[in-house]
Image: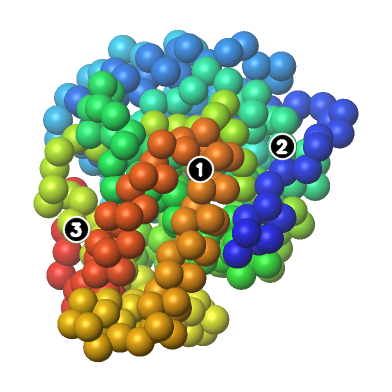
């Protein structure tokens, strides 16, 4: 897995000319988050090529549209007030499609309305997106508030998922992705059929779309550089986090065979891990069992720390010792719960 992680990192860039970029954001009832997002957009460093910002107001019932109207035309911002319904689409894909169709440029950069964008974001995207690169994934950190520490279990867990995402990119077998910091070409989206076949799902605008696009992708990279890292401010809504995890797990049935097999293996692997721990606690484990658990822990800690060095968040490594117990249990729970469906989305 370490080999896959480092294989997915961008190579030293050549002297390619910066291309114009379209930033696309869908926002539904994000009045409390939009001022922070818009301020970060206004603070983007001057970019060597042109860029535009397309924000799609997706059926908001709060003050989102009023806030967006005050920013219309400033800092390259265009607002689309999307209030229609599109047959075969649920969730935010219809709003994203409106933004993609309106985009003037080939490179599309996506983030979410609850995010804060670093000033160097466009420069870092351009550094990696040479004319032959079609897809780029960036790292993101989740905070409850802007002043909260990133030293939380959810951020250690995200680090694990980014390792998986990078490994999937390097072997052209996508495992996961993150829509809050994802870049791809409009021409690639169109060539791959866009959201056809997945528009009826509430999520999947990141990983399922990547799986559709992968056969047509020439080069894809994972860029963990701090200059490209986005911060997502999700608040303390436990119910929202709960339903988001269920929504993600519910996509299992739509995954390709290789990913279903991998998920099933991990599910059984974690079950056996708990059996091994119980036997050790009861004093029924032998030296071989103890050695196996210890080796698993050392290998996992090693690869996670190598990734945390890349994203400059090595302090999260201390959380491994709690996450080694919690993460498998959470994976098993949401795997079962996600198969039952019944979740909410805004």
**Residue 310 appearing in the image:** yes
Residue at 35% across, 71% down = 251
Return the x and y of residue 38 as percentages of the image width and height: 37, 19
Q: Is residue 137 above or below residue 260?
A: above
The residue that label 1 is drawn on is: 308
Return the x and y of residue 131 as percentages of the image width and height: 80, 41
Going by the image, does 141 lie left or right of 131? left
Q: Are marks 1 and 2 in contact (CB under 8 Å)?
A: no
Frontmost residue, 45 versus 324:
324
SS type, badge 1: helix
Q: Is residue 57 above or below residue 340?
A: above
Visual colour scheme: rainbow
Chain-order first, disc 1 or disc 3 = 3
Instruction: Specify the quadrant of the image occupied by residue 129.
Output: top right
The residue that label 3 is drawn on is: 243
Chain-order first, disc 2 or disc 3 = 2
């Amino acid at each position: 897995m370490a080999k896959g992680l480092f294989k997915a990192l961008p190579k030293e860039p050549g002297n390619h000319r910066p291309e114009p970029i379209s930033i696309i954001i869908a926002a539904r009832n994000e009045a409390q988050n939009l001022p922070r997002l818009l301020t970060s957009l206004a603070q983007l460093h001057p970019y060597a090529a042109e860029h535009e910002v397309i924000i799609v107001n997706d059926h908001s019932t709060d003050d989102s549209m009023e806030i967006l109207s005050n920013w219309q035309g400033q800092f390259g911002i265009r607002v689309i007030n999307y209030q229609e319904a599109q047959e075969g689409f649920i969730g935010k894909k219809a709003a994203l499609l409106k933004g993609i169709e309106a985009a003037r440029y080939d490179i599309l950069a996506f983030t979410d309305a609850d995010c804060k964008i670093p000033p160097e974001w466009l420069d870092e995207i351009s550094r990696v997106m040479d004319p032959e690169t079609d897809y780029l994934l960036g790292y993101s950190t989740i905070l409850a508030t802007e002043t909260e520490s990133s030293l939380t279990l959810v951020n250690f867990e995200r680090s694990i998922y980014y390792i998986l995402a990078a490994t999937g990119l390097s072997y052209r077998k996508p495992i996961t992705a993150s829509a809050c910091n994802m870049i791809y070409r409009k021409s690639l989206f169109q060539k791959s059929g866009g959201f056809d076949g997945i528009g009826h799902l509430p999520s999947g605008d990141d990983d399922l779309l990547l799986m559709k696009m992968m056969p047509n992708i020439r080069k894809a990279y994972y860029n963990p550089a701090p200059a490209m890292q986005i911060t997502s401010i999700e608040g303390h809504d436990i119910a929202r986090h709960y339903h988001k995890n269920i929504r993600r797990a519910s996509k299992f049935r739509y995954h390709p065979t290789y990913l279903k097999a991998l998920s099933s293996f991990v599910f059984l692997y974690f079950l056996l891990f708990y059996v091994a721990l119980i036997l050790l606690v009861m004093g029924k484990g032998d030296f071989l069992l103890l050695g196996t658990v210890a080796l698993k822990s050392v290998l996992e800690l090693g690869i996670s720390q190598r990734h945390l060095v890349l994203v400059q968040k090595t302090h999260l490594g201390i959380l491994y010792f709690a996450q080694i117990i919690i993460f498998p249990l959470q994976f098993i729970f949401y795997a079962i719960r996600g198969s039952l469906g019944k979740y909410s989305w805004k």
